[in-house]
Amino acid sequence: MPGDSAVRPTGGPTPSYEEGELPEPEAPAPPEGSDSGGMMRSSMIMAVGTMASRITGFARTIVLAAAIGTHLLGDAYHTAHTIPFILNDLLIGGLMASVVIPFLVKRRKRDADGGKATEDRLFTSMVLALLLVTTVAILAAEALIWLYGSRFTPCSSRRRSTWPASCSRRSSSWA
């Protein structure tokens, strides 16, 4: 019959359906070259990587505890290790994601030089700020140690601040 072909002429009337007779919509075909399981695969890769990172971090903590102990030397190492990472998380981690990156993207779009001058000025000011923060941290080292290592005794605090010298004296006295 003339109207039974699968291909309809483009200028013909649109078929009308009564209630309950609507055909099932066809699922759209995935675009060519797309991977239908890509999101699941990417999520699994991230989960495996995160788990491997957690396991190796736990192993690192166990090895450090076995090597330097959990008493004075371990506490001093932990305090000296924690302070720079806290400053990094507070200053660099949040600041970079929330302020600096959006600012640089906006400047790259709007500036005639693609934001190069802004990036240079920002880099120079960040190096100077890092130098200033480092100098203040060195000058305030004792206060920072007391802030993070408040349970140290005055004697252990003295040992912490003179740890390299006391280690060299101890090693020479052991010989």
Image (spheres, helix red, strand yellow):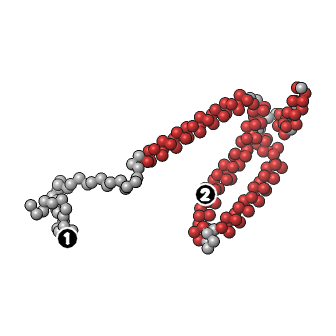
The amino acid on which the numbered mark 2 sits, given as a three-letter code, is Ser
To which residue does mark 2 refer?
98
Q: Please name whichever residue, 69 or 169, is drawn nearer the observer in this view of the structure.
A: 169
Q: Considering only order in the chain, which callout, 2 or 1, is on the residue closer to the N terminus? A: 1
Residue 109 placement: quadrant: bottom right
Q: What residue is rendered at 69% in x and 46% in y? A: 86
Assign a secondary structure to mark 2: helix
Where 106 falls versus 75 (above or below)? below
Q: Residue furthest bottom?
A: 112
To which residue does mark 1 refer?
11
Q: Residue furthest top?
A: 174
Are discs 1 and 2 less than 8 Å apart at CB?
Answer: no
| Front: mark 1 or 2 | 1
Residue 97 x %, y %: 61, 55
| Left or right for 96, reference 147 | left
Q: Residues within 10 Å of mark 1 (few under 14, many from 20)?
A: few
Residue 95 x %, y %: 65, 56
Q: Please name whichever residue, 21 or 112, is drawn nearer the observer in this view of the structure.
A: 112
Residue 38 x %, y %: 44, 48
Residue 90 seen by the camera: yes
Specify the label residue 37 is tagged with: none
Where 99 falls versus 157 (above or below)? below
Q: What residue is rendered at 81% in x and 45% in y? A: 141
Residue 154 seen by the camera: no
Residue 68 placement: quadrant: top right
